[in-house]
Amino acid sequence: MRRCAGEAEAKETPIGYVPTPQALDLDGLDLPSEAMRRLLEVSADDWVEELKGIGEFFTKFGDRLPQQMWDEYQAFGRRLGKRT
């Protein structure tokens, strides 16, 4: 909720804002910092593969899919640095 109020740190990524480790309450967790780094990591290459699947899924709806969803899909591709 602190993030929604703009009070917690987050890192901007192609998929949106991801919290920093400092913004999370990790009390009681014995989690090495490297593990937390990997948990919060966003791989654009992995998301490019996911984007392909999203496009295939959207195509199944044909013209019934709202244009706004295609617009968001294309914007996501641009954020990933790929053409959709």
Image (cartoon, grey):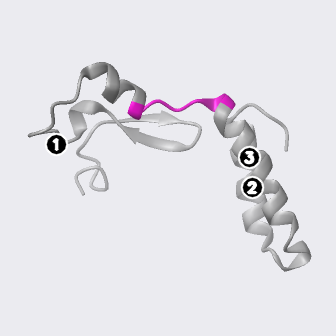
- Quadrant of the rendered image containing residue 80: top right
Numbered circles on residues, count? 3
Residue contact between numbered discs 1 and 2, judged by CB atoms under 8 Å: no
Above or below — where is 38 with respect to 17?
A: above
Does 63 appear in magenta? no
Query: SS for tag 1?
Result: loop
Residue contact between numbered discs 3 and 2, judged by CB atoms under 8 Å: yes
Above or below — where is 73 with respect to 60?
A: above
Q: Which quarter shows the C terminus?
A: top right
Q: CA distance from mark 1 to mark 3?
A: 31 Å
The residue sitting at the right extreme is 62
> Mark 2 Cα within 10 Å, few/some/many (few <14, many 20+)?
few
Q: Amino acid at mark 3?
A: Leu
Label ID, residue 51: 3
Please give the residue where the numbered disc 1 appears in the rendered image: 25
Horizontal side of residue 2 vs 53, given as left or right: left
* First to last magenta residue range: 39-45
Front residue of this view, candidates 63 and 51 = 51
Above or below — where is 14 with respect to 62?
A: above
